[in-house]
Image (spheres, rainbow, N blue to C red):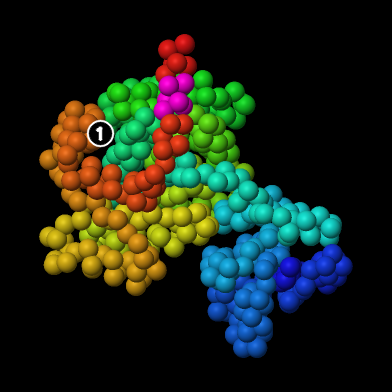
Amino acid sequence: MRVFVAVDDPAAFATGLAGEGHEIVHTTAAVLPALVAGEAVLGAEAHAVLQAVSLADAVLLEVRRDTLTSELVSLCDTAGTRIVPLCAADADVRLAAAFGLERAQQREVEPWRLSEVLRAVPAHAAAKAPGEPYPRVVAVWGPAGAPGRSTVAVELAVELARGGRHVGLVDADTHAPSLALALGLPDEGPGFAAACRQAELGGLDVRELTRISEPLGRTGVDVLTGINRPSRWPELSDARVGRALAVCRDWADFVVVDVASSLERDEEIVSDLDGPRRNAATIAALRAADVVVAVAAADPIGIARFLRAHAELRATIGATPIRVVANRLRAGTLGLDARTQVRRTLDRFGGIGEVWFFPPDGRSADAAILASQPIAEVAPRSPLVLAVRRFVGEALVPAGGAAAESRAARRKKGARERRLG
């Protein structure tokens, strides 16, 4: 394996890895690749670093705030080069995780152990279930400005439940949770916060999730409602959310997670690195997801906001697939041929080549709010419902999964029996 060593005092690492049979393509100080990626260093030195990134199979990087940047991650992603992080402190480990890198290694790791890590499948990739025919955890995200995240999350959950599947709908929004209010469910129930607390204590299982969730009529969707007061956000820490969603994988065939818009990591501007973070639940849910449905409001302001936030989303989730939805598309705000305008704008400024469109349906949305039900229940022939159905069939659950359907039906039956028992 060809390795680019970017650590302070790289000679010892280079010698050790060469002794384990790896080819060392280049060695530099830890900070230099980030400076080159940010165009702070030019000339022959920068050319050598760029060439090494393109030639190497992996970059061995000593992670600090000055050595790991979004520009460097983007550079390595473009070259298809893996980043193997080395960390000397817990804060550096959290920083590596925040960028979606694989499990960090200690700075003093032995060469033989590091060689095994380089030859193995990255830890975060191995965590995905091999051979899974469809994504199990779907996070619904969108930038600030109410692009319709919660509405899309609800309709996705109901559509995914068609055919006898059991779907969990999770409200992990720590800024403005709304699923309980929109669906007429009690917001004083235990909900997702209780699941997170139980997960931290090791007491969360399928039976407990069934007990604390709220069934959404006869749709096959069970809802874990959000916090009923925004001040309770410290209950949804990153570790708790990650553990709770891991258990949710065994509870439902699909888990749809509604998250807040903000991806800001406020630990960069405060000194208390171990304190709770308001956006930890959003970031943890996005990292745990198999696919992220990114919702953009299909108007000039909404598209501009989406493009600014999209780069930050990609830096947060790494290589996790993103399915982009332009919501409430109408010609009145974009003029003629609105779809083509949105497609060209997203492709030109965001490199987004594939996008799905959801039409506005104010009458059905109003009826759903009035009845405290999903749009699919009050207006099953709504153009929005049909667009969501088409999106699910094309982007999430391709047709032809008969085996998955039968397994889903069996799980739903078991969930019913556990609830009744």
At x 61%, y 26%, the residue is 201
Residue 402 in sight from this viewpoint: yes
Q: Position of residue 388 (x, y in %)?
A: 28, 45
Q: Is residue 135 magenta?
A: no
Please, what secondary structure does the residue beneath circle 1 have?
loop
Front-lying residue, 158 or 282: 158
Front-lying residue, 48 or 413: 413
**Mark 1 — residue?**
374
Q: Is residue 366 above or below residue 63?
A: above
Q: Is residue 383 left or right of residue 406?
A: left
Q: Which residues are magenta?
A: 409-415
Q: Is residue 98 left or right of residue 178?
A: right
Q: Position of residue 193 (x, y in %)?
A: 47, 29
At x 23%, y 35%, the residue is 376
What's under tag 1, amino acid-wise?
Pro
Q: Is residue 203 above or below residue 161?
A: above
Front-lying residue, 168 or 268: 168
Residue 255 in sight from this viewpoint: no
At x 52%, y 44%, the residue is 132
Q: Is residue 410 magenta?
A: yes
Q: Quadrant of the N terminus?
A: bottom right
Categorize mark 1 by other alpha carbons within 10 Å: few (<14), some (14-19), many (20+).
many
Front-lying residue, 388 or 279: 388
